[in-house]
Image (tube, rainbow, N blue to C red):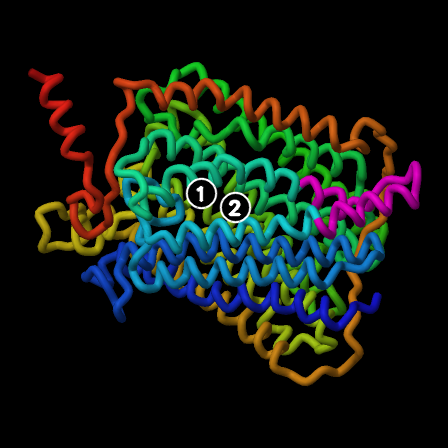
Amino acid sequence: MKVDKTIRNILVAEIVFPILLLVFGIYHGLMQVLYRAGVIKDMSVAGIEYYQGLTLHGVINAIVFTTIIIVALGNIVFLYYLKKPLRPAVQWLSLILMFGGTLMAAWAMFTGKANVLYTFYPPLIAHWTFYLGAALLIVGSIVPLFFDWLPNYIAWKRENPGQKVPLAVYGMLVNHIMWVIMVVPVVIEVLFQLLPLSLGLVQEINPSLARTLFWAFGHPVVYFWLLPAYVMLYTVLPKIVTGEGKLYSDGAARLVFILFLILSFPVGLHHQFTEPGITNNYKLIHALFTLGVAVPSMITAFTVAASLEYSIKAKYPEVKDSYLYWLAKIPYISLEGNKWLVSYFMAGLFLFFVGGITGIINASYNMNQVVHNTSFVPGHFHTTVGGLVTLVFLGMSLYFLSQLTGKEIKFKGLAVLAPWLWWQGMLIFEYAMSVAGFHGFPRRTNTGISYLNPESPLYRPEWVGYAELSVFAGVLIVVGFVFWAISFFGTLLSPATKEADLEIPTAEAYHDEKMPALQKLTPWVVFSSLLFLISYIPPLYDVTKRGVFFDSPGYNDKNPVPITKPQSAKEDKNEKAELR
């Protein structure tokens, strides 16, 4: 289909801008493994401090890159499948808010005024521009949903009574509704705790309340990253693997989206198993829901595998009766047509399998105690958001860039090799980090100047080999990204060779079940929201109990001295009187 030039330019900007930032994010990821292995024995390189770089790596890769790319994918999906134009004014507003907010937060991070890491836990406090920038990014990401996607969805339903909305639209709509729900607690944290403390409007805040509000957002956001990748797995992968493949079950795919809508929210407390004062019963409930999230992922594993098996066997009759040999017919490395994308999906799926297993360990209370705050945790999430999610986003970004600019993909051979280098590097990285985590190797810490420094009294030689292996893995990952970047920017800077248009390879359903209960989203959204409230009101009450949790002034990462005045002179006098 043809795309309006203004909308096309906006879509290209929504793809290119986060990729440019991702270059910085990947660079700081490499610097992390060099710091932690002791290759760099310092607190800063080129004016960027260790925790400053760690913040840039986490925020750019996990928040900025993913959010803007997901908005771009949502715009493309709604535009292509509903065949209804996007509104330029809405898209410009979204773009300006997201880019402006990102640049505002980037200024705070690059100038060292926001060394608070991806989780921005208080009492560490950043410059107010970091929080306001993040808020603008979130608002900008929601604008298309309310002013473009939902109106077009409602209009399509009115024009096509009784018909199922296209699966890709269904998935992206559910995903963004989840996004709107999950950002509520973190917006409350930012607006009523972090911003006032950063601006000096209050002297102290409750860090435990802030952490609980953050994780009410911080784990559901994993599924916000994941579901767009699932959309592409269901619609694109079965089609491109043979050119005529089918999705095994449309109903199973829609059920997966609804299950994520329900199960994604009451899970955040499994990040707070060691938090005192939160009743263990609530932690148990969240642990069970977290384990329950494995169910839609297992349904996805079956659906994708069945889709691939059906598609391959329909194309190659000689493997029709085989149990496993059909796997050898998947074009893991191919330059034919759109089959180059298969490498991104398959490498991502292989990594996600490992990520799912290690995620179950994190969700299990007893096993979590073994790996809590060790390198095992980043080892896990690098195979989820850094595995399937990132590889699908990179592959589809390159594909849509070519489509929207009318340019042939350059250096396609490098583009096909890139995900396999990334896969190998990330698999080695996961092994090194996870096994080191079993031996107590800490996360976040600049271990190169302490635990892995032979001159330090804290030296732990048993961690050295794992840290050095993670350096090798990091180099492989970066080489894979460089291969992809050469193809991406080579395509971007090349002259157009055809008229720009938009086409998404889409697999038809082999089993197209009706399942009317899944067609109306409103009841599921209401049920999900109520479950969210029920699961979080008691623990939020717990962390606000007086005498159990205490308020704290703000600090920065440079000095263990409060950066705000703890209390007024009058309050100090009253407190001393009470003590007497």
The label on residue 380 is: 1
Residue 383 horizontal/vertical position (percent): 49, 47
Question: Quadrant location of the N terminus?
Answer: bottom right
Residue 166 horizontal/vertical position (percent): 82, 46
Question: Would you say the magenta stretch is mainly helix, strand or loop?
Answer: helix
Query: Which residues are drawn in magenta?
Result: 147-174
Residue 447 horizontal/vertical position (percent): 22, 51
The label on residue 384 is: 2
SS under mark 1: helix
Dots 2 and 1: beta carbons under 8 Å?
yes
Up-down: is 188 above or below 10? Answer: above
Up-down: is 99 above or below 411? Answer: above
Amino acid carrying label 1: it is His
Residue for point 42% across, 58% down: 105
Residue for point 75% across, 36% down: 254
Query: Can residue 498 be seen in the rendering of this structure?
Result: yes
Q: Is residue 161 in the magenta section?
A: yes
In this rendering, position of residue 346 left or right of residue 509: left
Q: Can you name the residue that lies furthest to the front here?
A: 570
SS under mark 2: helix
